Amino acid sequence: MERKIGLEIRTLNNSIKRHLDFSSHKNEIEKITGNNGWIIGYVGENIEKGKDIFQKDIEEHFDLTRSTVSNVLTKMEKKELIKRLPVEQDRRLRKIVLTPKAEKLQSLMKNDIDDMEALIVKDFSIDEIDQLHGYLERIKKNIS
């Protein structure tokens, strides 16, 4: 039987999702949908590094359309997970910041994601991890 890379990636994605669904903090974060959780993590991680995040950054990082990100961010605002704040130098821009509610969730999710990442790369050498990243980047480039 021919092995299909796309199917393997899809199956791996399902396994990762299932692993996170049964995380130790499931009860505290169960109301957060997948995209919300990844966005909270991304925004929080960048804020910790002192970097402002805007809608365009989220679109590019997750390879999502402007309308999709706009809808997700609007829903996240309604759930009081983020705020979009104006930027002094350009009033058209709105930087994305986490609310205290989302900051707590981000802290809990970070532990679960770090544990999952360690599990994924267990028994891989640094060179193998670098190669895998290269392969995944090429796949993403081929698709786009």
Image (cartoon, rainbow, N blue to C red):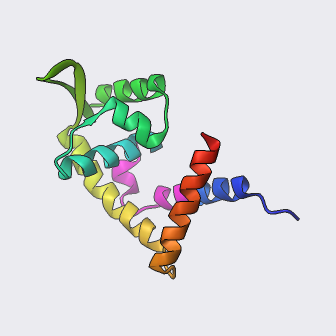
Q: Point out the stretch of residues depicted in magenta.
A: 16-32
Q: Is residue 121 above or below residue 110?
A: below
Q: Which percent across, then down, holds residue 62? A: 45, 41
Please identify the quarter of the rendering in which residue 54 is found: top left
Residue farthest toward the top in the current orientation of the protein: 92
Q: Verify whether residue 20 appears in magenta.
A: yes
The residue located at (32%, 63%) in the rendering is: 111
The residue located at (40%, 55%) in the rendering is: 26
Q: Verify whether residue 106 appears in magenta.
A: no
**Which quadrant of the rendered structure holds the C terminus?**
top right
* Residue sitting nearer the eye, 48 or 27: 48
Q: Is residue 61 above or below residue 8?
A: above
Q: Which percent across, then down, holds residue 7? A: 72, 54
- Does the rendering let one see residue 108? yes
Q: Which percent across, then down, holds residue 65? A: 49, 28
Q: Which percent across, then down, holds residue 100? A: 18, 42
The residue located at (38%, 45%) in the rendering is: 37
* Residue sitting nearer the eye, 125 or 16: 125
